[in-house]
Image (spheres, grey):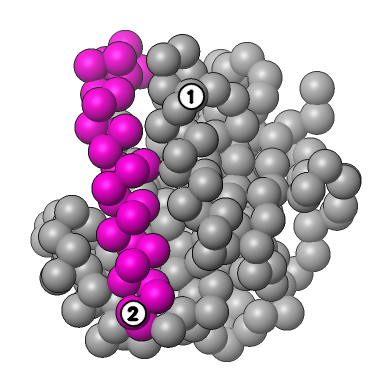
Amino acid sequence: MHWQQGGLDDAPLISKFEGVRVFLAGATGVIGVRLVPLLCEQGHVVAGMTRSPEKTSLLSSLGAEPVVCDVFDATALEDAVTRFAPDAVMHQLTDLPDRAEDLAQAAVRNDRMRSEGTRNLIAAARAAGATRFLAQSIAWRPPGRGDVVEQHEQQVRAVGVVVRYGQLYGPGTYYETELPQHPRIHVDEAARATLPLLDLRSGVVTITDPQ
């Protein structure tokens, strides 16, 4: 695994930011569902946000306090985050289709998640007084979507840490039985490498397999 921060290679460390309250938006996503138990194992208290009420039992079984909320409802989101009073907010939200071949049609929805969704979550984190903010991004620029990704990262860099993941492969991803092109990272490794980033207050970190 290649873990790069600010242009310098570093080995990922176990987080020293322990036993805190973490609000995880996108907790039932492919990375989020792996992060919840890892965070709980480190002694963190986790609120797992989902917009699907039927997924609350999954979050409870993983150890999180389920929060049903739509990131585009800014008022409800601020209320939910403020009520939990997190030390850290993690943004693992996407709006992606179940099939890779449908990605092009879903691009506008995911753009909205990166723009309006990110803006709303940052505002909620600020209102709640969170001292850490971390948001997922990607380690490549899809054709026609580069500007949206850059604007998303600019918003996050102003308050916290951008995590650029390679293309995810492994169970539950678009690449369960084959490897995508570089940049790429196994989804389990992506989740594990995210934990120590709670120690950071700002920066850009890239998490990929070595080429």
Up/down of 99 relative to 188, above or below: above
Disc 1 marks a residue whose amino acid type is Gly
Q: In this view, does 54 lie to the left or right of 175?
A: left
Q: Which residue corresponds to the image point at 55% horizontal and 73% vertical from the top-left?
A: 132
Circle 2 sits on which residue? 127
Up/down of 204 relative to 95, above or below: below
Quarter of the image that includes the N terminus: top right
Q: Residue 61 carries which label?
A: none
Residue 160: quarter of image = bottom right
What is the number of callouts on the image? Answer: 2
**Foreground residue among 57 and 180:** 180
| Residue 117, horizontal then vertical, whole percent | 29, 50
Q: Residues within 10 Å of mark 1 (few under 14, many from 20)?
A: few
Q: Is residue 21 left or right of residue 203?
A: left
Q: How crowded is mark 2: few (under 14 residues within 10 Å), some or many (20 or more)?
A: some
| Residue 161, horizontal then vertical, whole percent | 60, 58
Q: Which residue corresponds to the image point at 85% horizontal and 54% vertical from the top-left?
A: 11
Magenta-tinted stretch = 99-128
Q: Which is nearer the N-term, disc 1 or disc 2?
A: 2
Q: Which residue corresponds to the image point at 77% horizontal and 49% vertical from the top-left?
A: 5
Circle 1 sits on which residue? 146
Up/down of 137 relative to 33, above or below: above
Disc 2 marks a residue whose amino acid type is Ala
Up/down of 156 relative to 94, above or below: below
Q: Is mark 1 on a helix, strand or loop?
A: helix
Provide the major secondary structure of the magenta segment: helix
| Residue 47, horizontal then vertical, whole percent | 35, 75
